[in-house]
Image: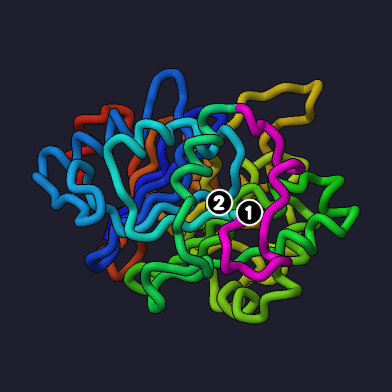
Amino acid sequence: MKQVIFNVGGALSTYTEFDDKKLLIDLGKSTDFNPITDFLLPLYNQRNAKKSIYATDKYFIDQLIISHPHRDHLSAITDFNTNFYPDLLTCPNDNEGMPEGHKINWTLVGNEEEEWLKTLKQMLVGRQPPLRATSDQNEFIYYLHAEKVENDKELTDESYCNNISIATFLIINNYRVFLPGDLQKVGIERIIDENHLLKNKLKGGVDVLIAPHHGLQSSFSTVLFDNMKDKKTNSLNIVSEKPNNPEESRDVDARYSSSNYCNGNNNLKGGNGVEKCYQVKTSRGHVFIDYTNRNHPKFEIITDVKELLKKF
């Protein structure tokens, strides 16, 4: 029962093992680190892991979730497709059999000539809807219907593609982890309002939050925290950090590092003389979480990939 949020710069990728399931969410890579070739492939090689019955030259993985088809969540997809075959591929798409209102508008997504998007579309061919989770006891997915996003000016003005993000809620050894993808402020408000099951999950508490849209100020949602137990996360807010760019207002929102939005119940130490740690940025290293401890998860910041592999 372990998870790592990779240091991939201004992108996102996270790998989780719980019970007998292996789950990969998003496939962003950086110039320095590729989650597939630098971590997942060496891990599966050293384990001599089983191959897929559908693609016998590829390793089996239970599920790949692509929260939404933006490059910073997909840039390692070719390496993934070369080496792995997911039992479930869960991604906003337009496959036959889906309700018309759920099919995404690729024109609004854009980047249709990019190779990474062509690879994703090829992988989606023949995949059966509906969008679903690999474990109905531990994993829950939520999303706004694509047609609803397209027809809502506030949502499309924020970003059509970001607001069709799949939000994933994980319960691992009774710890609660929320990954809202790149949902933005209005998108978060809508998805909570329209999904009473998600609202109930949030009210039950969130231990670890992978901050929406890389923790940017433009996407900080007080509505999200207002719907959580105690109106804050219990353990830690994690930011898959984008470089600062004042011209684009891409600074990470400082509220994630405040005791107003996190209890800081973790084994890490805060900086600048602050005893508790409320936020960790992946720019410090890969964020490894061990959920086997019943008192609270154990967090580590790991910069050496060999050390990270040993944890699994």
Whether 72 is drawn above or below 177: the answer is above
- Which x, y percent locates residue 143? 64, 64
Name above or below for residue 118 compared with residue 226: above
> Residue 4's mark?
none
Q: Is residue 305 left or right of residue 50?
A: right
**Label 1 Cα neighbours within 10 Å, binned few <14 / some 14-19 / many ≥20:** many
- Residue 9, x across and y down, in percent: 51, 28
What residue is rendered at 72% in x and 31% in y? 250
- Region rendered in magenta: 94-113
Q: Amino acid at mark 1?
A: Ser
102 in the magenta segment: yes
**How far across and how far down the image is residue 240, in percent?**
53, 38
Relative side of 225 to 172, left or right = right
Q: Is residue 281 left or right of residue 154?
A: left
- Residues 240 and 94: in front is 94
Q: Tell me the residue at 31%/59% (across/down).
A: 62
**Circles 1 and 2: CB distance less than 8 Å?**
yes
Q: Main secondary structure of the magenta part?
A: loop
Residue at 59 percent across and 51 percent down: it is 181
Q: Nearer the viewer, residue 94 or 16?
A: 94
**Which amino acid, by three-letter code, is at mark 2?**
Ser
Q: Which residue is mark 1?
A: 165
Quadrant assignment for the N terminus: bottom left
Of 281 and 58, which appears nearest the observer?
58
Quadrant of the rendered structure where residue 302 is?
top left
Residue 26 rendering spot, x and y as whole percentages: 47, 45
Q: Residue furthest right?
A: 153
Report the number of discs. 2
First of labels 1, 2 by sequence position: 2
Crowdedness near tag 2: few (<14), some (14–19) or many (≥20) residues, C-alpha within 10 Å: many
* The label number, if any, that marks residue 67 in the structure image: 2
Does the image show residue 20?
yes
